[in-house]
Image (tube, helix red, strand yellow):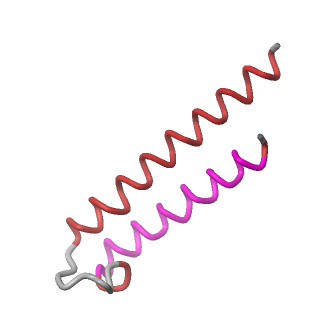
């Protein structure tokens, strides 16, 4: 379970990095889109960051519950 937590954390950090890069230069993160703008970057990478952060905290909570028992 620890490896899943580490993987989720690394994915959150990567998604956050892509979000920051995309806010600076949207065309770098949305090169496959016809129209690249910051709103699309926020929608795609922002939602991905939030979802992955929720997954990370759920995994962390489950791991802590197993340690308590």
Residue in the image at 69% along x and 45% along y: 5
Residue 63 falls left or right of residue 38: right
Image label count: 0
Point 71% across, 51% down: residue: 6
Quadrant containing the N terminus in the rendered view:
top right
- Residue 54 placed where, x, y %? 49, 39
Q: Is residue 16 above or below residue 24?
A: above
Q: Quadrant of residue 64?
A: top right
Residue 13 belongs to the span the image colors magenta: yes
The residue lying furthest to the top in this view is 69
Question: Is residue 62 rendered to the left or right of residue 26?
Answer: right
Residue drawn where x is 25% and y is 82% of the image: 33
From the image, which quarter does the C terminus lie in? top right
Among the 4 quarters of the image, the one containing residue 39: bottom left
- Viewer-nearest residue: 44 or 19: 44
Q: Is residue 17 above or below residue 31?
A: above
Left or right, 68 with reference to 24:
right
The spot of residue 30 in percent (x, y) is 32, 79
In the image, the segment drawn in magenta is 3-26
In the displayed structure, 47 sits above or below 62; it is: below
Q: Residue 48 placed where, x, y %?
A: 41, 55
Above or below residue 56? Residue 8 is below
How far across and how far down the image is residue 15, in percent? 48, 63
Please, what is the dominant secondary structure of the magenta stretch? helix
């Amino acid at each position: 379970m620890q490896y899943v937590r580490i993987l989720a954390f690394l994915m959150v950090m990567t998604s956050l990095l892509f979000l920051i890069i995309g806010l600076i230069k949207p065309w770098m993160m949305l090169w496959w889109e016809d129209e690249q703008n910051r709103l699309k970057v926020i929608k795609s990478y922002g939602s991905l960051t939030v979802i992955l952060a929720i997954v990370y905290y759920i995994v962390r909570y489950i791991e802590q519950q197993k340690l308590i028992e």
